[in-house]
Amino acid sequence: MKAISLFSCGGIGDLAVSHAGFDILVANELLEDRAEVFKHNHPSTQMIVGDICDKKLEILNATKNLLNGQKLDLVFATPPCQGMSKNGRGYLLNAMRKGVKSTIDPRNQLIIPTIEIFLQSGADTLVMENVPEMENTYIPNPDKDGEFIKILDFIKQSLSNAFVSSVQVIEFADYGVPQNRQRLLSIFTRNEKLKSHFKKYGSLFPNPTHSKDGVFLPKWRTLRDAISHLPKLNAGQFETSFDDSIEYHKVPLLDEEKYFWVSNTPQEKGAFDNQCINPTCKFDKNPTHSAGKDKDGINKSSTETPLYCVKCNSLLPRPWVKTGDEYRLMKGYTSAYKRMSWDVPAGTLTRNLSYACSDKKLHPEQHRTLSLHEAMILHTISDYSFDWKRADGKKVSDKLIRELIGESIPPAGLEKIFLHLTAILNGQIIEAKTEAKQFCLLDD
């Protein structure tokens, strides 16, 4: 089956598409660095580098030439998510209605050329991946000046009645990924087999393979399952911050202050909650850090969290800012400088996965953040043949690796979704359900 990929980044999500049986003919990516990684790992795909708005005709012409009279089956698109607002219909929409144009992120409107390419390509099916907030993100309605429309409503408005849509927020831990990562998957199709399946079952997504509680299904894969076997590292000094036997099993050094906070942080805790380490005091009932919503509904951290022990007045090993000889508690949320938990999946890996101050990014017990190698395992990239190399031969920086992981979707989980689609197209899903039903009748 034939596919094209839009907003392809480094091609991590495209591993799922190709492994599910699709031949990716053409891909488009804005940034050269990411495109070079894609080209190395997907050498048979024609990569078109540049802004999708400027490259629309080139993408369509390249697709037509490579199809050589065949039909395009799929468009896979992962538009940038940074512009998707959690405020949805709240602050953002009100601001737009008041004419505050700066709140309208132009990246959200990249959905417009995406749909234009999909419709003009002749493909039957569009699969889109984005953050859950996409459901409540608005863009200016291109058909009605001065009005705004939800992105998903715009897509449905742009497509004919021949299409059906199956939209769902997917928790990738439910598909065996050792990471909690929720993404919005949207499938729009006019393929008759897919439509028939949707009409019968109400969804185009496969059933979960794992569950949080482990009832009837295997339990979620945990951090312990995925990385506990790896050699220990310590970010306190260079000699202990890497392991030569495993490529990318290395971590950035922590400066003296950060290491002091982190090394005094117990398992399951955050540095903002650290207790007194004065050997003559050891008071462990100092108030812990908290956060709450202010009168405007905005989540803010407490300004009352003590930095000095309430019993002996010793400086606590909590994140601080020092000005001259004075210390004050650093502004930060309860999840900053916090350890991950061994027996649950990792939290969502972001571009900041190597920063101790980021959201719950400390190793469960070692004094460091995740190594890049561990991140590759937790993101399931290590399940595939994927090289951290560029087609132009230049070195792939650690920064680029972090960005590609943080901006992509775990391919092993996504592959299960695409395999489900290909199974429907090949008639395997209905046959499997029929066989299961017959077995149950015979068993009774």
Image: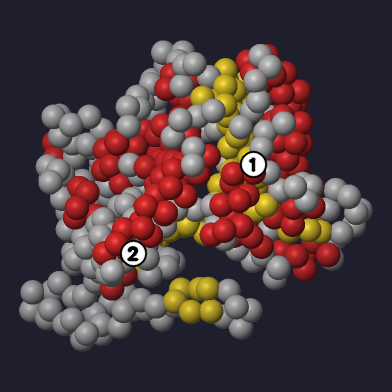
Q: Where is residue 65 drawn, in percent x and y? A: 68, 14
| Type of the residue with mark 2 | Leu
Q: Name the one closer to the observer, 229 or 219.
A: 219
> Is residue 357 in sight in this rendering?
no
| Type of the residue with mark 1 | Asn
Circle 1 sits in a helix, a strand or a loop, which is it? loop
Residue that carries the numbered disc 2 in the rendered image: 441
Q: Name the one closer to the observer, 70 or 108.
A: 70
Residue at 43% x, 19% y is 40
- For the N terminus, the quadrant is top right
Residue at 78% x, 58% y is 149
The answer to which image quadrant residue 400 occupies is: top left
Earlier-in-chain disc, 2 versus 1: 1
Residue at 61% x, 32% y is 73
Q: Name the one closer to the observer, 180 or 157.
A: 157
The crowd level at tag 2 (other Cα within 10 Å; few <14, some 14-19, many 20+) is: few
In this view, which residue lies farthest toward the left? 280
- For the C terminus, the quadrant is bottom left
Q: Is residue 205 left or right of residue 90?
A: left
The answer to which image quadrant residue 116 occupies is: top right
The dot on residue 353 is none
> Is residue 235 in sight in this rendering?
yes
Residue 285 versus residue 54 in the image, above or below: below
Alpha carbon separation for disc pair 2 and 1? 32 Å
Q: In this view, does 2 lie to the left or right of 333?
A: right
The crowd level at tag 1 (other Cα within 10 Å; few <14, some 14-19, many 20+) is: some
Residue that carries the numbered disc 1 in the rendered image: 191
Q: Where is residue 335 drawn, in percent x and y? A: 37, 65
